[in-house]
Image: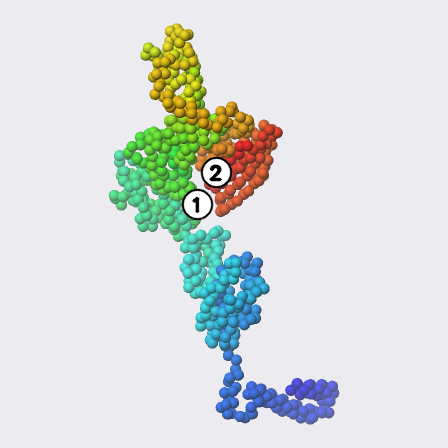
Amino acid sequence: MYGYFKKLIVFVREIYEGFVMKYSVRIIVIFLLSLLILAGCEENSKTSMVQSSEQGTNQESDSEGDVASSEESVIVMHKLYFDVNVTSSEDVFQNHSIELYLDEQPFHKFEDGKYYTELAEVEEGNHVISFKVDDAILNDLNQNVNVNADMSIVFTLGFNDSLDITSFGTSESIADSAIVYDSMENVALDKAIEDLANKHFVNVRYESNDSTSILDTSEWLVVGQNVSPGSQLDKAEEIVLTCRKVYFQLYFDLSFDQNIFLATYDIEVYLDGEKIDTIPHGKNFTYSTKLKEGEHTATFYKSTDNKVFSEKKINITTDSTLSGRLHSNNKDIELNNFVLNNGIADTSFEVVNVVGMQLDKALSVLGGIGFTNVVKEPSDDIWMDSNWIVTAQSVSAGTKVDKNTKIVLNSVKKEAYLSSNYVSLNMNDAAKKAKELNNEILYVDYAKNMYMTNKISTMDENEKKLWIVKQASFNSEGKIQLDFIYTGMVEMPNLMANNLADALVTLKNAEFSDVESKTQDGSYIWDNSDWKVVSQSVSAGTKVNANKKIVITVGKNDAVQATTQTSSPPLKEETQDSSDASAEKEAKAEENSVDSSSTEPESVTEIKKAEVVLPDRSSKLGRDYDSKGDSTVYYINVDGISNKPKLKNWGKATVTDGVAEYLDSLKEQNFKVEIVSTDKQTPHSGFTIYDSSFKVSNSEISWTMDLSIESEKYVEYELDIHLP
């Protein structure tokens, strides 16, 4: 056929070059012949195609066997729709090559975590779906699919250490591959999301028209869409809905004046004709609700007569707070200073721990935060708040609640609280109890009537167990003062012929806590310096428990004879004290059995420990002193309120202001302070942990310190000073 066209072109060219007139008749004949030739070629071509399709049979043959043979050679095709839910994150596909193969040929490469759909045409019959990860075909995941109609292949693809194919199945339907999209404009966002999900759209995204976050879809209206209504979309097509917020929070923050005698009724609150709550007379009222933008009416009725009322029109355009003061009269309800303010800030607060505080201080702390409904129990027994201690609170510390939430503080009297929790505990257990009860305690030596801060810093854990709480009390600052007595074995000093005043000082310095002095003639002692010791209930040199009662007998200075002033008590006193002889012998035996090292004087070790410069007790860090172990002194503040710590940078380390002050003081004393390590972690938003280690040294001594800080709503910390 191509040759005939070529001849025709040659003839036309000749005609064009000047033979038109000479060969006009011939041209017409040639043209007609060409048309006949072309028609013949087209017929021959059709005949050739029929012959080929019938595999060599005659064109005019119409036998049934030949027709059947032709039908069997036609290839039947079907639509195959891949419908794949991808659950793996984007980084999986950045680190791995994951491909889907159809009949051992690459078909699709997964490059992101989006829902995947694709419509293909395949021959009828059996097909193999397989997967390749990186360089390996995973034959154990092969799936055989018999395609005998239009159908969908559905499965979920995940990756967790290895490829995971689940819920693999087929469906004789491809309806989800072409869904008609309806307009979502002016439809509530939550309903639009539900409607699109019911139509099987799986890639719906929504955003605000003012860049604010959409937290509650029921508050928003669809005002724009990226797809034209009526379009036919694949189920995985991305649909973006633009939304405008139309519902807002309204917060009532009202106070209700209390009348003593008249008009002491409650007030019922209605919003747009619907009752929302009742305000008890004289109580504060808070309430939160959601309203659509526009004008609304708040109405306040007398609870016993709905003819007495007042109302307030409010126009809602954003989150708002309605604040004001209600005053009840017999004939009307006054609405004073009613204002609608934008925003609803300061309506909820975080409850702090007030357990262990004096009740008056706890009420002050919670009231200072903003809580308006704090109740004390047992309410009928409490007359003076400062005489009671909070033992439990109905809302746990750290909980964030509305300021009008009822918080019940259960309390007991101070005396019962101290007696049940502290008296008779040893020093270690008292420290643990104080931490458990959120108490700040002061350590006092009962016998010497002086603070024990310095003494405790040199004690080991075993020695602390020998100090027992004799009595407990609250000081003017609300701290608990614990008076300790020593219960270890001490040597009885020789008091004979000593002035009574000096003898009492000697016993006090020896840690004797139970001392009684009496006269020979039973007279009253007005001035200790007028009397001298004539006998003592325990012989000098005897090892005795420091808690044992010591009785000393005295006589007037001018009546005491020098001959009676011996180093031992009179025989009479020994006889009186004979009941203690066996106990004293046992005490001596126990003392002798102690390792000889215990009788050695204060050693170099103690001197070396004393050289560690600890924070001054009056400093900010010193006031957070907690306890001392065998080799570590602990400074802890874990309530974030008492002696409130603040974060501060010291070199490359984040410390508290108290620690920074301590480190500066060490440098001023010519110590070298090194930052050994620092670490910062943020487990979740708003919560940060800072860890730092330090080394302190001079030419004579060195020690290390570890500081751990937790910063969330407030700062908590622990500084561990490791003794050398």
**x 48%, y 67%: residue:** 83
Closest to the observer, 127 or 464:
464
In which quadrant is the C terminus drawn?
top right
Where is residue 590 drawn, in percent x and y? 43, 26
Q: Residue furthest right?
A: 18
Instruction: Name the residue that disc number 1 marks.
Output: 343
Q: Relative to residue 376, is residue 276 depicted above or below?
A: below
Q: Are marks 1 and 2 in contact (CB under 8 Å)?
A: no
Q: Which mark is residue 716?
A: 2
| Residue 87 x, y percent position in the rendering | 49, 60
Of residues 282 and 127, the one nearer the viewer is 127
Whether residue 70 sits left or right of residue 475 in the image: it is: right
Tag 1 secondary structure: loop
Label drawn at residue 572 = none
Vertical placement of residue 33 versus 167, above or below: below
Is residue 582 found left or right of 644 in the rendered image?
A: left
Looking at the picture, tell me which residue is in the foreground, 614 or 571. Answer: 571
Q: Is residue 26 visible to us here?
A: yes
Tell me which numbered mark, 1 or 2, is placed earlier along the sequence. Answer: 1
Rate crowding at label 2 as few (under 14), some (14 to 19) or many (20 or more) other CA atoms within 10 Å: many
392 vs 207: above or below: above
The residue located at (42%, 49%) in the rendering is: 317
The residue drawn where x is 26% and y is 36% is 262
Three-letter residue code for mark 1: Gly
Q: How did the renderer colour the structure?
A: rainbow
Q: CA distance from mark 1 to mark 2?
A: 31 Å
Q: Secondary structure at mark 2?
A: strand
Residue 307: quadrant of the picture? top left
